[in-house]
Image (spheres, coloured by chain):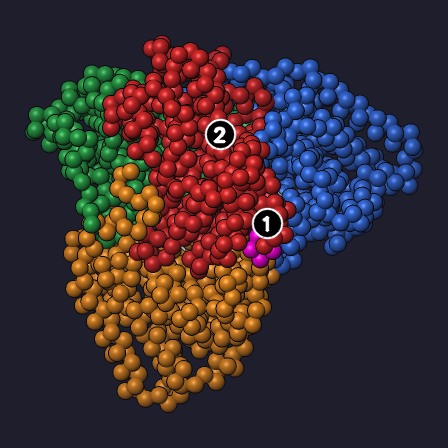
Chain colours: A blue, B orange, C red, D green
Amino acid sequence: MESDSSPADRIAPERLAALYRTMLRIRAFENAAEVASRGGVAAFGAAAAAGALVRGPLHLSTGQEAVPAGVCANLARSDYLTSTHRGHGHAIAKGAEPRAMMCELFGKSGGTNGGKGGSMHIADFSAGMLGANGVVAAGIPIAAGAAHAIRIRGGDAVVACFFGDGAVNRGPFLEGLNWARVFDLPVLFVCEDNRYSATTATESMTGGEGAAARARAIGVPAQQVDGNDVAAVDAAAARLLALVREGGGPQFLHALTYRFKGHVSVDPATYRDAAEVERALAQDPIERAGQRLAALGVDADRLRALREEAEAEIARALAAAAASPAPPAHAAYRDVQDCGAGQWR
Amino acid sequence: MESDSSPADRIAPERLAALYRTMLRIRAFENAAEVASRGGVAAFGAAAAAGALVRGPLHLSTGQEAVPAGVCANLARSDYLTSTHRGHGHAIAKGAEPRAMMCELFGKSGGTNGGKGGSMHIADFSAGMLGANGVVAAGIPIAAGAAHAIRIRGGDAVVACFFGDGAVNRGPFLEGLNWARVFDLPVLFVCEDNRYSATTATESMTGGEGAAARARAIGVPAQQVDGNDVAAVDAAAARLLALVREGGGPQFLHALTYRFKGHVSVDPATYRDAAEVERALAQDPIERAGQRLAALGVDADRLRALREEAEAEIARALAAAAASPAPPAHAAYRDVQDCGAGQWR
Amino acid sequence: MAVMSYAQAACSALARAMREDERVVAVGEDLGRGGVFGQYRGLAQTFGAARVIDAPISESAILGAAVGMALVGLRPVVEMRVADFAMCAIDEMVNQAAKNRYMFGGQGRVPLVARLPIGIWSASAAQHSQSIEAWFAHTPGLVVVAPSSPADNYGLLRAAIACDDPVVYHEHKELWGVDGEVPEAHRVALGEAKVLRAGRDLTLVSWSRTVLDALEAAQSAAASGVSVEVIDLRTLWPWDRETVLASCARTGRLMVAHEAVQAAGFGAEIAATAAEELGIPVTRLGAPRIPVGYAAALEAEARIGSRRILEALLAWMEGRGRRRFSAATD
Amino acid sequence: MAVMSYAQAACSALARAMREDERVVAVGEDLGRGGVFGQYRGLAQTFGAARVIDAPISESAILGAAVGMALVGLRPVVEMRVADFAMCAIDEMVNQAAKNRYMFGGQGRVPLVARLPIGIWSASAAQHSQSIEAWFAHTPGLVVVAPSSPADNYGLLRAAIACDDPVVYHEHKELWGVDGEVPEAHRVALGEAKVLRAGRDLTLVSWSRTVLDALEAAQSAAASGVSVEVIDLRTLWPWDRETVLASCARTGRLMVAHEAVQAAGFGAEIAATAAEELGIPVTRLGAPRIPVGYAAALEAEARIGSRRILEALLAWMEGRGRRRFSAATD
Ligand SMILES: Cc1ncc(C[n+]2csc(CCOP(=O)(O)OP(=O)(O)O)c2C)c(N)n1
Ligand SMILES: Cc1ncc(C[n+]2csc(CCOP(=O)(O)OP(=O)(O)O)c2C)c(N)n1
Ligand SMILES: [Mg+2]
Ligand SMILES: [Mg+2]
């Protein structure tokens, strides 16, 4: 870890509590979504179980909460964020409402996307969250372009561009980072390195020293950070985003974390070593932050209250999602395009 | 330059003469093609001049001859090569016949590709030259795959993969190098850095330190070389190809050279600084090799004979191309595909 | 003769090809774990990681490398996971694989099979549900296949692997679990359609998963006294004009149904051809020109389905206009 | 009213849009030097490098960045150089640009214009000559344009830039130098075809460069007593069904001619629609399903041309079969 650990060490209890709260909200959302998704994936031609509330591929960020929480604590609502297929945490941390998000997962008209996107495309443009993306690495050039627009239009917004460790092997990683560097754009690239690309250990598919080394070779300064230490992520993001805001061009944060669950909700992840998983679970970013808060003197009641609040919020989101109506069939023909929209012609 | 210059310094006169000869043959070919192409590009809707012998976009490698000459001197005919839109030099150095190549540029049935490809797709599979390619960087994954096939099928062939400095900004550069590294494949990547991407100075479009740095970050060892010093290119290629043949996986050669002509034959290249061009012309790799040969005691008659031979060969190629018949119209329907080939259905 | 799923049938065809021809290799992401739909299950164990190649997430390299492999003597079977991701490798598919043989004057061959699972896979939304077989039918140099049954997936995958030119091979994600009998010797020639049901009044041409809907609609139509001949096209390029046009000439009417968007879909090619050649009445039913939405009600609008086929077919036969059902509107 | 070339007309439309709306920017390789076909000449000098953006050779990033720019308030006009290179950016065009508005539930708009020069450009061979407009017509979310004259290139580019959704804008490489009058106020609504020549016996629909051939063929046909109505489609999606079908209803026959490969080309959509809706005789003439070869004799086979249109048209009218000329065969 090259991160300068001192600012993280000096974190104020209130700031850490806020980060803790964000992580709790994400965790509660993921847990609830996971339960609601049981039977919801259409496997091998069998339709999804009729009773499943959340259907289709569901990529949970459980265990990775410190990265979006720490990064987004340093973003304003007017900043932008691009995301991945594993985007719930990014959305919540950026300010999307869990209620509208859960509606989206339920495929309801009250959803962030009106039911058109589901988990893989969750987005809240009003919070600057430009969308989860079903195509690995596709958000990278989009983030560069968003930053380019900011540069041209003026203003001090920045873009945080999240992607996984698997994305560094796709061409748009190179093209997007190069773009941001060449045009000196205000982007913070954030590689959420959970060590796996679907069922494959990313290391076995990645030549060289990985994400940070590649970024540096393209001229984008890079820093590694313990992605399970939310204070460290916060401090690193604060430092890098300050550089970005000063106009120094793109920066790169390589956050080392772990995916607690399978790649999708139905993946038992048997390809992972039990000992490895156990070690990783012991680094639960929420547990670590909780212990740290306790050590900083935040009392147990306060921590319990934060947990209960987060869970209550998600319980309300679930209820709202259940109550929200399904979109009407005719909504399927809306938002295609203005000119040339239609049905069959 | 990191190249270990001693083997280059010790080059035997006969070897240098052979390299010189290859360069002369390429130069003579390019010069002849250039003359034959006058009026051959259809510009702005006007058809190409009826009298033009070589039609369409023509990318000349004039001035860059030392790179293919030096690299290919270390390849067997059974080795493979992938090329770019600027592929004449690669083809000649790899063993293609200038006569068949000139026929191809003339669009004749005696052409390497039967007239189907022209300059941009010049290929001689029988010499292991897998084709020029009209899409920048597209040859890189193809080279990785060819090397992968070699690895799987056994045998000690290797692949030389040529591309320009502009190609390092395209995604397939990352994807192809990573592939070769991950599977430890026998490829020598050769970046022919002539400093321009069409009309644009590549440096202005490239973040970081460029080709070699990017290769290293992907885990592919890289060496820079003076690409106008054919002995240096030869020595570097010899060293790197020995490593590749030993099974150490891919290597990368970054050769610094210069494009004497415009991007295409009709490009006056006014975007380049006259002083820069003058400096570059003074580094003509053929002149330099000739002086070196003279210094090594090869007499002027021998050098003149080599030049005249090369020019005579190309003159014969021109005559053969002029005499070769155009392909018959029905050839247009051949070599599309076996199953489903046809005309309109 | 074994009963197996569409996924198992493909797996079994590939295993057989790999046993019989050591040049055959499989390349794609997560193949070592059997592929995301289990369509490579057990192959890595049998043939080893050198021939069942786990790839980095890099579709350009996967397909580009396959072109290089094919040029140097292998016969790669390439997994694209879903057709939507193949959009990351269109240069490699079209400019490199499809044009190679031609532009190099026949010096090389590119015997690769690119597997592009198409179609809606319930609740997978816009980026995992598209069907783009028409693009490849429009591309010289490519063979285009889309089997509808386990037996044909077995028989056609074998034929595709044996083909010396690039084949775009479309499996349907909602067919993976469908079971059927698969004769071990089964092999289907590329370019041969199959008449699945004989009929007198109308020829209904379809392919891939929509064939199941077409058959269901045909059965219901029979109850209404309309006798429908159902043809499974199986290969889109070259398509079996002879079988289709002969059937059309007999029935005097053609309907084409496919899951891909109707506008500029391959149904247009077939319908236009039948109209040109025979002057018979033609109609098409493809998806509306909308992306596939996530919510069930939205996704349903993007599905053809047997009910829509039946309604369109009966309405048309009864002269009630070309398409009677109307999509819900505001 | 100025006389200018097709390239100048585009340049002038773009300059005007950039003057009138500061959100409009141009993005692509070598734009600073005026673009490879001169279609950006002078713009960098007028508007500066910040708005006429020279890009690295990275089509994925060019189009992907344009999506990001569009989402954050710009209106990028993106140069792809030739349509074949756009194949390096199909994920960005289809999965990112076209699906964005829909899959995010209408939260954003992607008002970008992707310029994809299509068609044969003499002696440029297989990787610089393709026409793929049918792919985009098949893709929900996209508007597809293909102007045939300087005036329409001016008028349609303005309309495309004003459009709030992604537009795939196809210029033809062999039209760049064609001159014509361009009224400064000219603006063409997207989706409006134009009847270029009135006729009684047959409706001939075309677009892009083939319109010139169609007009020539119509003129020659008149000498043989066949009166041909020529329609320039101009926009492929949405296509002007009303104008085309009304003309077809009058003439009773439809022929579609386009430079793209005939198989699964957009002509099939038009022909199938006319057959479905009107039951009239239809025929198509597109390129054979071959890549474009380099040698003049090979390239010529991939061109439609006025002679082939005329021959096909007369043969068809005279009932001598659908297409009388035959390609040279072995
Ligand atoms: C271009 C593309 N190829 C393949 C996939 C299938 N896929 C979805 S997620 C995933 C793994 C991504 O790994 P990583 O980037 O590390 O993100 P993580 O899932 O670990 O968060 C893959 C291969 C895809 N979505 N897009
Ligand atoms: C994917 C792609 N984009 C754009 C082009 C147009 N183009 C042809 S050559 C060239 C410049 C290539 O520069 P470089 O790689 O340095 O090779 P050089 O021409 O200098 O030999 C460009 C942009 C192309 N052929 N392919
Ligand atoms: Mg990962
Ligand atoms: Mg260059």
Q: Is residue A63 left or right of residue A119?
A: right
Q: Give B190 or B197, whichever is nearer the viewer.
A: B190
According to the picture, the residue beneath numbered tag 1 turns out to be C43
Question: Which image quadrant is residue B32 in?
Answer: bottom left
**Residue at image location 92% in from the left, 32% down from the top:** A300
- Tell me the distance, in whole angstroms, between the alpha carbons under discs 2 and 1: 26 Å
Outermost residue on the front side: it is C1
Task: Specify the segment rendered in magenta.
Answer: C48-55
**Residue at image location 58% in from the left, 21% down from the top:** C296
**Residue at image location 75% in from the left, 31% down from the top:** A31
Question: Which image quadrant is residue A12 in?
Answer: top right
Instruction: Tell me if I can see residue C103 in this picture.
Output: yes
Whether the residue carrying mark 2 lies under 8 Å from ligand 1 is answered with no
B210 vs A158: above or below: below
Asked if labels 1 and 2 touch by Cβ distance under 8 angstroms, the answer is no
Give yes or no for residue C52 being in the magenta stretch.
yes
> Neighbour class for label 2 at 10 Å: few (<14), some, many (≥20)?
many
> Neighbour class for label 1 at 10 Å: few (<14), some, many (≥20)?
many
Q: Is residue D60 left or right of residue C278?
A: right
Q: Is residue D325 left or right of residue C266?
A: left
Q: Check if mark 2 and mark 1 are on a common chain.
A: yes
Disc 2 is attached to a residue of which chain? C
Q: Position of residue B176 (x, y in %)?
A: 52, 55
According to the picture, the residue beneath numbered tag 2 turns out to be C209
Mark 1: amino acid = Leu
